[in-house]
Amino acid sequence: MLIRIVKMTFLPDKTDAFKTRFHKIKHKILEFKGCEYLELHQDKNNKCIFFTYSHWQTAKDLNAYRESDFFKEVWAKTKTMFTEKPEAWSVDKIVSLKKPG
């Protein structure tokens, strides 16, 4: 499994538009082959910063998504709302703990 983390910093007046757009497309992202999990997080101290966490079965699946017409269209619109260049990492999970109960 591959975990993809993307940090995006938006113009202050675009954060609501981004959240609305994300909620409209989140299920389409999850429907892509190999996508098993998707989360959106917003920074507590800087409401302009968001992170997406997605879990992919393989790097090939992630790359197929990133090369899709859907992604290209979504990204073209999303990147117009940024104030900083986005950052992205592909990581492997080493440890995951959850308190019982």
Image (cartoon, rainbow, N blue to C red):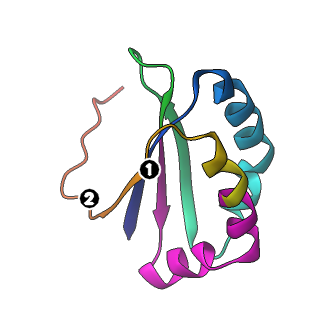
What range of the chain is rendered magenta? 51-75
Q: Which residue is mark 2?
A: 93
Whether 31 is among the magenta residues is no
Query: Mark 1 Cα within 10 Å, few/some/many (few <14, many 20+)?
Result: some
Closer to the camera: disc 1 or disc 2? 1
Please, is residue 84 above or below residue 91 in the view?
above
Quadrant of the rendered image containing residue 29: bottom right
- What is the total number of numbered labels drawn onto the structure image? 2
Quadrant containing the C terminus in the rendered view = top left
34 and 6: which one is in front?
6
The x and y percentages for residue 67 are 62, 79
The amino acid type found where label 1 is placed reads Pro
Q: Which residue reaches farthest left?
A: 94
The x and y percentages for residue 37 are 54, 55
Of callouts 1 and 2, the N-terminal one: 1
From the image, give the main secondary structure of the stretch colored magenta: helix
The x and y percentages for residue 79 are 61, 50
Q: Which residue is mark 1?
A: 86
79 and 65: which one is in front?
79
